Image (cartoon, rainbow, N blue to C red):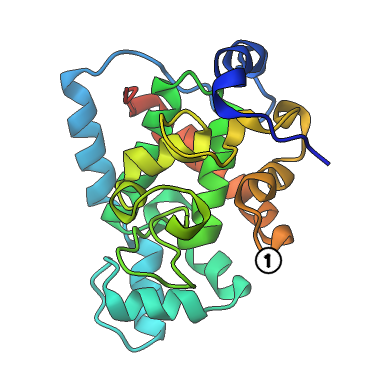
């Protein structure tokens, strides 16, 4: 069992130690270059190519084939089986444009905080399992909100903080300046743990085995989108 350390005590040390995993086998080597004028164009290009799988999902469920997540689509996604979700989401292009933008934000915040790519993969896995990167502004389960389905009642922040994607990403990584819950870098030994186990150590989910199924998707997503995502401070 991992030992949860307090956030301030391990922040700097964890980032230094985790730096050794910048080249994890099978993990994308994402660029950490400063924000450039081309990054916006890259994000726009990704958005234009998005929603492929989502449109097929909507068609199967008799929903308008928009390629974007509305209330009805979000409800259908929440009720879909893992098998159908894997059929729907095979590449980054299958996400809706807003959801792909949220995934890119998770990557950017990780870069800005100096989180190694393995940690970024874990964050992407978590958000994919929890919400498919849909930023829920109203509770879905209990008082869970946002792309990580964090709960105000359990110390993850205010609803406004949780539904702000950059802020909730910082909270998941363990680099936010608020909250007492352990984030990624407060999980002792996270660098060498199975990624799905790290997701569970942060999230404490009732379904601990479901994160691992999205590992390859997360790695592919990082490989495709990471090189054009600038760091977000």
Quick one: which residue is furthest to the right in this view?
1
Above or below, 16 relative to 97: above
Q: Nearer the viewer, residue 175 or 130?
A: 175
Q: Secondary structure at mark 1?
A: loop
Q: Is residue 36 left or right of residue 225?
A: left
Instruction: Please give left or right for residue 121 compared with residue 229 in the image.
Output: right
In the visual, does 173 lie left or right of 147? Answer: right
In which quarter of the view is residue 113 placed? Answer: top left
Q: Is residue 132 visible?
A: no
Residue 9's place in the image compared with 40, above or below, is above
Image point (34%, 13%), residue name: 33
Rendered position, 230 above or below 164: above
- Judged left or right of residue 84, residue 157 is left
* Residue ranking furthest to the bottom: 62
Q: Residue at x 77, y 34 (%)?
A: 3
x, y percent for residue 227: 40, 25
Q: Position of residue 138 (x, y in %)?
A: 32, 69
Rendered location of residue 19, percent (x, y) = 61, 13
Q: Quadrant of the C terminus?
A: top left
Q: Residue visible at 35% across and 39% down? A: 167
Dot 1 alpha-carbon crowd within 10 angstroms: few under 14, some 14 to 19, many 20 or more: few
Looking at the picture, tell me which residue is in the foreground, 150 or 81: 150
Residue identifier under label 1: 206
Count of picture labels: 1
Q: Is residue 221 visible?
A: yes
Residue at 51% in and 34% down: 173
């Amino acid at each position: 069992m991992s030992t949860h350390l307090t956030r301030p005590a391990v922040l700097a040390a964890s980032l230094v130690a985790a730096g050794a995993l910048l080249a994890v086998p099978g993990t994308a080597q994402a660029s950490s270059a400063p924000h450039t004028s081309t990054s916006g164009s890259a994000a726009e290009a990704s958005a234009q190519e998005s929603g492929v799988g989502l449109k097929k999902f909507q068609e199967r469920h008799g929903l308008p084939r928009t390629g974007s997540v509305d209330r009805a689509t979000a409800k259908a996604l929440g009720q879909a089986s893992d098998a159908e979700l894997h059929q729907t989401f095979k590449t980054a292009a299958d996400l809706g444009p807003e959801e792909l933008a949220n995934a890119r934000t998770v990557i950017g915040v990780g870069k800005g905080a100096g989180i190694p790519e393995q940690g970024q993969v874990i964050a992407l896995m978590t958000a994919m399992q929890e919400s498919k990167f849909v930023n829920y502004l109203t509770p879905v389960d209990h008082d869970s909100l946002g792309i990580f389905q964090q709960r105000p009642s359990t110390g993850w922040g205010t609803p406004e903080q949780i539904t702000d994607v950059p802020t909730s990403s910082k909270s998941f990584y363990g680099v936010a300046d608020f909250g007492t819950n352990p984030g990624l870098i407060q999980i002792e030994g996270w660098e060498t743990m199975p990624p799905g186990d790290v997701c569970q150590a942060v999230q404490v989910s009732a379904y601990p085995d479901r994160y691992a199924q999205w590992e390859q998707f997360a790695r592919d997503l990082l490989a495709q989108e990471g090189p054009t995502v600038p760091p977000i401070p």
